[in-house]
Image (cartoon, rainbow, N blue to C red):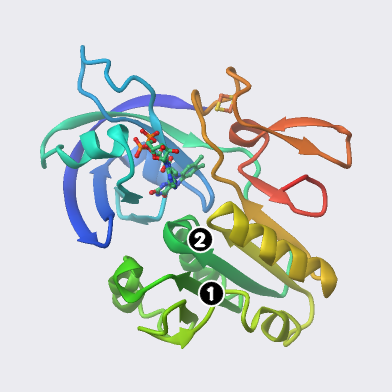
Amino acid sequence: MIKDYKVEITENRFISGITWLLKFKNKEIAEKAKPAHFVMVRPTSEHQYDPMMRRAFAIADVVDDEIWIYYDVYGRGTKTLTEKKVGDEIEVLAPLGKNLFPENFDYYLLVGGGIGFAGLSYLMKKLREKNKPFKAIYGVRRKEQLSMLDWIKENDFENNVIIYTEDGSYGKKGLVTRDLKELALENENTAIFTCGPHGMMKAVDKIAKEIKVPCYASLESKMACGFGICIGCVIKDVEKDSYVRVCYEGPVFDTYKIEL
Ligand SMILES: Cc1cc2nc3c(=O)[nH]c(=O)nc-3n(C[C@H](O)[C@H](O)[C@H](O)COP(=O)(O)OP(=O)(O)OC[C@H]3O[C@@H](n4cnc5c(N)ncnc54)[C@H](O)[C@@H]3O)c2cc1C
Ligand code: FES
């Protein structure tokens, strides 16, 4: 069940590029959190209503009772969030999302673009816990945007992750799709799980369909409520010929069944 929690910030600091890392403690959220779950954070304090809407963020990691969120600073909501200090309280709706990543495959190829990698990082931990083989592709434009590089190193995932930068300043030069076909065909019963900019996910989906590999996308549409009542985040379900809410029926969708 979704709950509105008041949580205390334990860390909120700049990482690199435009990315910040926010941590807060809550035992209940930590126990319930699963990969692809997300939270809606109210950026303002009590009795302040500007900006009013909460902002959605993926649960990037859970360490003991601490929830980790990596956030890119774009507009007023995320700028307001950077002003929060350790010890400040924030209101968080969590955990959100019903349809999460399926677990019935033999090999997992994760494809994360930019901050979208934070939508896959907790899944990496869970796959390792369950001894499921996987590789993760992490792509950004340039080195400074690799905001989860320390997380990858600290969690000993270096052998699982292949990094691509568009300008070649770190890892392999090119887009996340550069070697995707070959990597997706290396193992039997592979599924691609992707999260990132819309254009990138469309490109990943196109390749998956060309080589007939299952593909699941964790969508990050603009959200007002985050729990199904405003109908602001709908996408077309082509299989059912109707619309589904990303926040409520998602955020993970089989890309063969939706209009991405
Ligand atoms: C399920 C879900 C999970 C998400 N997880 C994460 C996450 O883990 N980390 C993260 O950083 N973001 C994540 N997002 C995106 C995040 O919610 C938005 O980036 C955030 O709400 C923007 O708020 P803001 O106050 O910065 O910008 P706003 O004030 O809402 O917008 C200001 C300006 O920035 C532009 N803008 C807003 N967001 C983006 C964007 N993402 N890319 C480019 N331009 C943008 C707007 O079009 C507008 O022009 C997620 C979204 C969803 C739905
Ligand atoms: S954000 Fe309100 S229905 Fe999805």
Q: Marks 2 and 1: CB-CB under 8 Å?
A: yes
The label shown at residue 120 is 2
- First in sequence, mark 2 or 1: give its number: 2
Where is residue 227? Give x, y as percent. 55, 26
Left/right of residue 161 with respect to residue 191 in the rendered view? left
Q: Is residue 39 left or right of residue 90?
A: right
**In front: 177, or 100?**
177
Quadrant where ligand 2 appears? top right
Whole-angstrom CA distance, mark 2 to mark 1, is: 9 Å
> Where on the picture, by quarter, is residue 155?
bottom left
Residue indicated by mark 1: 136
Asked if residue 76 can be seen in this view, the reply is yes
- Judge whether 18 appears above or below 88 on screen: below
- Tell me which residue sits at (63%, 59%) in the image: 201
Q: Three-letter amino acid code at disc 1? A: Ala
Specify few, some or many for label 2: CA neighbours under 10 Å numbering under 14, 14-19, or 20 or more: many
When asked about the image quadrant of residue 237, the answer is top right
248 or 242: nearer the eye? 242
Point 27% across, 15% down: residue: 49
Task: Find numbered disc 2 in the image and state the secondary structure of the residue it sits on.
Answer: loop
What numbered label is drawn on residue 245?
none
- Residue at 30 percent of width and 23 percent of height: 51
- Residue found 54% across the figure and 55% down from its top: 197
Q: Is mark 2 within 8 Å of ligand 1?
A: no
In the rendered view, tell whether residue 101 sits above or below residue 45: below
Measured as percent of width and height from the top left, residue 24 is found at 25, 43
